[in-house]
Image (cartoon, rainbow, N blue to C red):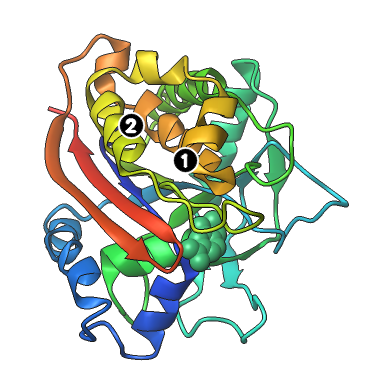
Amino acid sequence: MARITASVYTSHVPAIGAAIDLGKTAEPYWQPLFKGYEYSKQWMKDNKPDVVFLVFNDHATAFSLEMIPTFAIGTAADYTPADEGWGPRPVPRVQGHPELASHIAQSVIQQDFDLTIVNKMDVDHGLTVPLSLMCGQPEAWPCPVIPFAVNVVQYPVPSGQRCLNLGKAIRKAIESYDEDLNVHIWGTGGMSHQLQGPRAGLINKEFDNGFLDRLIADPEGQAAVPHIDYVREAGSEGIELVMWLIARGAMGDLAGGPAPQVKHRFYHVPASNTAVGHLILENS
Ligand code: DHB
Ligand code: FE
């Protein structure tokens, strides 16, 4: 049986990817940020998963206003890092896991969540920056990745409650897969940031830290928070945080198991225009 042993949460700021790719991680601006991920890179090596189920959002790269899937699961054998305007990032191609992804699609759709099935997709900073933060700069990523794209860019966006419930369905799907696989689920994006309009540059440390507290200890309570509160408190792009509830919903305590262990918690302001948050939770 496949099992989810841990969940990882992290922001995905594109400038972090550029800092890594251009060798600037030791510069004074970036050093404190990357220090917060040293534990995480070692943890990834010590707890190497067989597969990462990576919840992220596409930023009008693979999708556009022409096509807006709310939830899209990648069932392809591999994915190319996208060209977001400065050429593709010099990072490895992402290997998929078509068998497990297809099984999850079948199970989650039968649990009444409508997923779009994606057999070809370039992956943008939403997916590659979390991989770089957690894995550094390897020749190849340490394991296959199932990309799971959520629309948090064009309204209407899914509610926190739906995201938490979807996470529970993903857990059931993974646990009904026959092969013994150690799966990590990642929730990415956020924390507070607004990239546009009069409030551009908004950061809200109090909201972000309250979110981290409740994500750990009261995910059901956090799921009840409406999307307008994210936008008001954490800025227009702060809504990316609802994706973290998908990963949290897949943890064992929400299916009657013990509370997850907090292995690592980190918060840093700023990286580019964004407050960076990061958590690692392990199922006991
Ligand atoms: C920034 C943050 C994001 O999450 C993003 O998708 C693009 C830009 C930023 O802080 O610059
Ligand atoms: Fe983003």
Q: In front here: 268 or 251?
A: 268
Quadrant in which the C terminus is drawn: top left
Location of mark 2 (residue): 211
For residue 189, side relative to residue 98 (left or right):
left
Q: Amino acid at mark 1?
A: Ala
Residue 92 is left or right of residue 72, and the answer is: left
Q: Horizontal placement of 139 versus 33: left or right?
A: right
Count residues near mark 2 (Cα–Cα under 10 Å), then give few for <14, some for 14-19, many for 20+.
some
Q: Which image quadrant is residue 102 in?
A: top right
The residue at 34%/20% (across/down) is 219
Instruction: Indicate the quadrant where residue 258 lies.
Output: top left
Residue at numbered disc 1: 234
At label 1, counting other C-alpha atoms closer than 10 Å, the crowd grade (few under 14, some 14-19, many 20 or more) is many
Q: Judging from the image, what secondary structure is the residue with disc 2 in?
A: helix
Give the residue at x 44% y 19%: 223
User: Contact, CB < 8 Å: mark 1 with mark 2?
Assistant: yes
Q: Position of residue 16 (x, y in %)?
A: 39, 72
